[in-house]
């Protein structure tokens, strides 16, 4: 049983603390109270503070589990109306949001801490004695002590821990509410670590590692997760205002194609010095090639591919993909290298959104790539009935080129515009139980599908559409971080699908190939000089199973 699985038991008290810290009682009507409206920010602060405390104490995997639970709750709030969240896991009784939780932790799980601290001390003693034995410097008494530790003390501690968690599991099962799911304490752990370990087994050539970012109390924490080794933590002091200003400056410059290239480069260099340089030597030592990035908070809107040292972009050195621990990942193996695409698009202007004249060309070019087959459904052919039939058909890729708008916390207003000008909301996706299980990839080639129209303080919008589609079964989702240029996107998608169909690259490498083609000129049309700018190729991000 690893550290994170044991710690997950304690994490079950967190939801109770959030409600109590807000000082609210369960409401009897459907209208949210002022205190309930503040719950997401309070919840965020509590979990973030606890995660930082754990990291400072050297409990990195436990901190990752705290952040994972926070992400799950943010996603639940993102895709469900506020009224639907009433009474969901918010009951309980604690005191101050931080110190109260810490005291509850120490009081309730004193036995756990005692056993674990003893285990750590005994482990260190055993390592020291083993080193002495290997060097031939061990005394008879020390040799006897080592044998006792190995044959008796360690097994006794492990048995005691097993009995403790078996009892705790039994107590949790007895106390659960009707219909409530209680996780297996032996199995619950960091999903990122589990994914990295699996990839080390099934795709060792990818040299995949995980990168997780957390800002709290004037400090940026970067966690590097590699297969078969403890997490590496690097911390950078930086005040919140400076941190947010750097991100905001880079994003605003990037999303405007007319921005001065020198200013764009300076902003991206500043971000790279903060986000990559502190961990760069560790990445090189680990032999990393594929970075699975879990960007907390404000970083969710950062196009990591475009970070640069003034000479090379990050995507030129690594394949990049986003990791969402709010969604249980599918097995990290390719579903099928032969793609049959249901290509759906709208060329029409709708409700203030401009027409997308290049969508027809985009879908045509995709379906003409070697190794890619499928059917194109354009404008009136792209309707709810055809979408539903395609979900149930023999396609394994769904490519949608249309407009989407996300209203955080309002799934009934977050909507995709179909080709016949009808709408499909996130509430419809969940309410109609539209399933995407057949799809190795769902691509949203549209305007700001990765982000909503307004970016919230913590950037939860990034995961709104992608996470909903993944929770409905899709293995991976590709979307964009800002409004994309119609003509360049048609070229970009052609490059992406060509790399997959012709070269049989995995999805992350196919995305990288398309981005490199723009950076290097490649087969881009006469506007190649403009298309080299990050505005045209950096917004596209891949979330989920990138194999």
Image: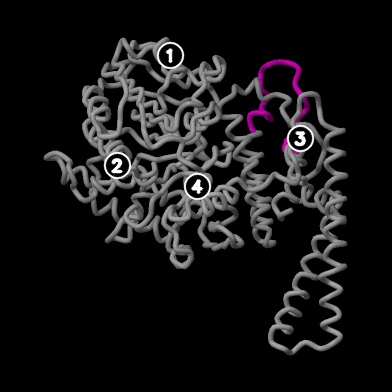
Q: Nearer the viewer, mark 2 or mark 4?
A: 2
Q: Nearer the viewer, mark 4 or mark 3?
A: 3
* Residue assigned mark 1: 389
Q: Which residues are magenta?
A: 18-38
Is residue 35 covered in magenta? yes
Tell me, yes or no, whether the two marked residues, 1 and 2, touch with CB atoms within 8 Å.
no
Tell me, yes or no, whether the two marked residues, 4 and 3, touch with CB atoms within 8 Å.
no
User: How far is the residue under mark 3 from the one under mark 2?
Assistant: 43 Å
**Element at badge 3?**
loop
Residue 269 vertical placement versus 90 (above, below) = below
Of labels 2 and 4, earlier in sequence is 4
Q: Nearer the viewer, mark 1 or mark 3?
A: 1
* Residue assigned mark 3: 182
* Residue assigned mark 4: 295
In the image: residue 505, left or right of residue 88: left
In the image: residue 166, left or right of residue 34: right
Residue 192 vertical placement versus 309 (above, below) = above
In the image: residue 181, left or right of residue 268: right
* Residue assigned mark 2: 499
User: How far is the residue under mark 2 from the one under mark 4?
Assistant: 27 Å
| Residue 226 percent across, percent down from the top left | 54, 58
């Amino acid at each position: 049983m690893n550290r994170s699985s044991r710690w997950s038991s304690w994490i079950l008290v967190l939801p109770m603390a959030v409600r109590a810290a807000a000082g609210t009682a369960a409401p009897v009507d459907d209208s949210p109270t002022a205190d309930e409206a503040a719950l997401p920010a309070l919840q965020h602060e509590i979990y973030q503070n606890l995660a930082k405390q754990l990291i400072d104490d050297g409990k990195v995997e436990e901190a990752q589990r705290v952040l994972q639970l926070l992400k799950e709750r943010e996603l639940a709030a993102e895709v469900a109306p506020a009224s639907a969240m009433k009474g969901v896991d918010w009951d309980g009784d604690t005191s101050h949001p931080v110190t109260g939780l810490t005291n509850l932790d120490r009081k309730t799980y004193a036995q756990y801490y005692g056993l674990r601290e003893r285990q750590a001390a005994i482990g260190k003693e055993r390592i020291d004695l083993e080193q002495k034995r290997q060097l031939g410097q061990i005394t008879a008494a020390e040799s006897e002590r080592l044998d006792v530790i190995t044959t008796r003390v360690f097994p006794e501690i492990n048995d005691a821990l097993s009995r403790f968690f078996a009892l705790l599991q039994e107590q949790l099962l007895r106390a659960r509410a009707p219909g409530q799911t209680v996780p297996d304490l032996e199995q619950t752990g960091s999903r990122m670590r589990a994914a990295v370990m699996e990839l080390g087994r099934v795709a060792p050539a990818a040299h995949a590692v995980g990168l997780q970012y957390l800002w709290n109390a004037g400090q940026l924490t970067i966690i590097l997760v590699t297969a078969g080794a403890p997490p590496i933590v690097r911390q950078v002091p930086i005040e919140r205002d400076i941190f947010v200003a750097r991100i905001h400056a880079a994003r605003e410059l990037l999303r405007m194609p007319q921005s001065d290239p020198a200013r764009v480069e300076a902003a991206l260099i500043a971000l790279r010095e903060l986000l990559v340089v502190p961990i760069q030597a560790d990445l090189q030592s680990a032999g990393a090639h594929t970075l699975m990035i879990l960007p907390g908070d404000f970083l969710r809107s950062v196009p990591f591919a475009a970070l640069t040292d003034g000479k090379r972009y990050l995507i030129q050195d690594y394949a990049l993909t986003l990791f969402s621990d709010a969604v249980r990942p599918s097995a990290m193996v390719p579903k099928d290298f032969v793609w049959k695409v249901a290509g759906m698009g709208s060329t029409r202007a709708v409700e203030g959104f401009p027409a997308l004249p290049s969508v027809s060309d985009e879908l045509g070019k995709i379906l003409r790539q070697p190794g890619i087959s499928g059917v194109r459904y354009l404008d009136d052919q792209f309707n709810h009935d055809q979408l539903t039939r395609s979900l149930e058909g023999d396609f394994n890729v769904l490519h949608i080129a249309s407009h989407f708008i996300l209203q955080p916390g309002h799934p009934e207003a977050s909507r995709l515009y179909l080709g016949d000008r009808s709408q499909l909301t996130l509430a419809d996706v969940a309410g109609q139980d539209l399933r995407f299980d057949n799809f190795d990839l769902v691509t949203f080639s549209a305007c700001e599908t990765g982000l909503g129209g307004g970016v919230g303080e913590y950037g939860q919008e990034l995961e709104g559409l992608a996470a909903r589609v993944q929770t409905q079964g899709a293995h991976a989702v590709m979307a964009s971080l800002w409004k994309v240029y119609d003509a360049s996107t048609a070229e970009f998608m052609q490059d992406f699908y060509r790399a997959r169909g012709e070269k049989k690259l995995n999805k992350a490498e196919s995305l990288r190939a398309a981005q490199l083609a723009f950076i290097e000129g490649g087969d881009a049309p006469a506007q190649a000089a403009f298309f080299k700018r990050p505005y045209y190729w950096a917004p596209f991000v891949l979330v989920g199973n990138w194999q």
